[in-house]
Amino acid sequence: MLLIIVSAGLFFWAERVLLTRLAAGRDFEKGMRYAEKARALPRDVLVKRSVLYQGVLKSLQRSRALNPADARVYFESGEVLAEIMPDKELRDSIVAGDFGIQGNTEEAFYASVKKYYIEAVRRQPTNAVYHQRLGQIYDVLSDTRRAEEEFDKALYLDPLNLSIHIFLSKYYLSKHNEEKFNVHLARTIQLYQKTGLAEGGGPLHNMMVSFLRSIEKEELIAK
């Protein structure tokens, strides 16, 4: 009899966990749909963008509450706040306190973005993109040591990621670190050639061409 009671309890617990995670997933997907709509709107459509972005934040907030172990929800929360942050009018329209943000200043938004990226990395430490984005926030906050530690982790986790190498080439160029710039530029060209992107085209090819054009080195991938 005891075994039956325990088994029934475990069944209902497992069912509840499953239903909770399904609900969290629905909230996450709903938030991503709102985000897609918000990103498609012109910048001057402030009221509708504000409503949509706050809908995103509310959906992600619910998703985090239902399934706090899901790293992607923290990451996307950071991504959305990072999108809102540079637009002062949009930022000021957000009811910051409703989303745990300590005010509508850039500093307050950056602090929340950093918090979410740290949580995403803590829950999924093997995700290279999460480390890269956390490093970018550290860089904005003038914490170069931590920024470069995160970039190194990203590269260690995904050494064949062309977009990370492109980013690091740009990063070290901006820091006037010629040695590291040349290392990453050479690796970027090597990866680009090995993957055959020149023939296939696509977003990464366009990113590569745009990057090389910006540094006047298009001849490096000329056929």
Image (tube, rainbow, N blue to C red):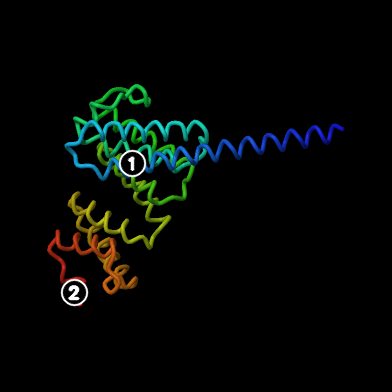
Q: For the residue carrying disc 1, how many other residues have a C-alpha within 10 Å: few (<14), some (14-19), or many (20+)?
A: many
Q: Pointer 2: what residue?
A: 222
Whether residue 145 is situated above or below residue 208 in the rendered picture? above
Q: Residue 54: percent from the left, percent from the top?
A: 33, 31
Which residue appears at 38% of the width and 63% of the height?
Answer: 160
Mark 2 closeness class: few <14, some 14–19, many ≥20 residues within 10 Å: few
Q: In this view, does 212 lie to the left or right of 204?
A: left
Q: Which mark is residue 11?
A: none
What is the quadrant of the N terminus in the image?
A: top right
Q: Nearer the viewer, residue 150 or 162?
A: 162
Specify the amino acid type for callout 2. Ala
Query: Toward which corner of the image does residue 60 lie, by quadrant?
Result: top left
Q: Nearer the viewer, residue 98 or 135?
A: 98
Cα separation, mark 2 vs mark 1, equals: 38 Å
Q: Element under label 1?
A: helix
Would you name the residue on which mark 1 appears?
35
Residue 147 is left or right of residue 170, and the answer is right
In the image, residue 56 lies at what x, y percent? 36, 36
Q: In the rendered image, which quarter contains the C terminus?
A: bottom left
Residue 164 appears at what percent x and percent y? 32, 56
Quarter of the view holding residue 185: bottom left
Q: Which amino acid does label 1 sit on?
A: Ala
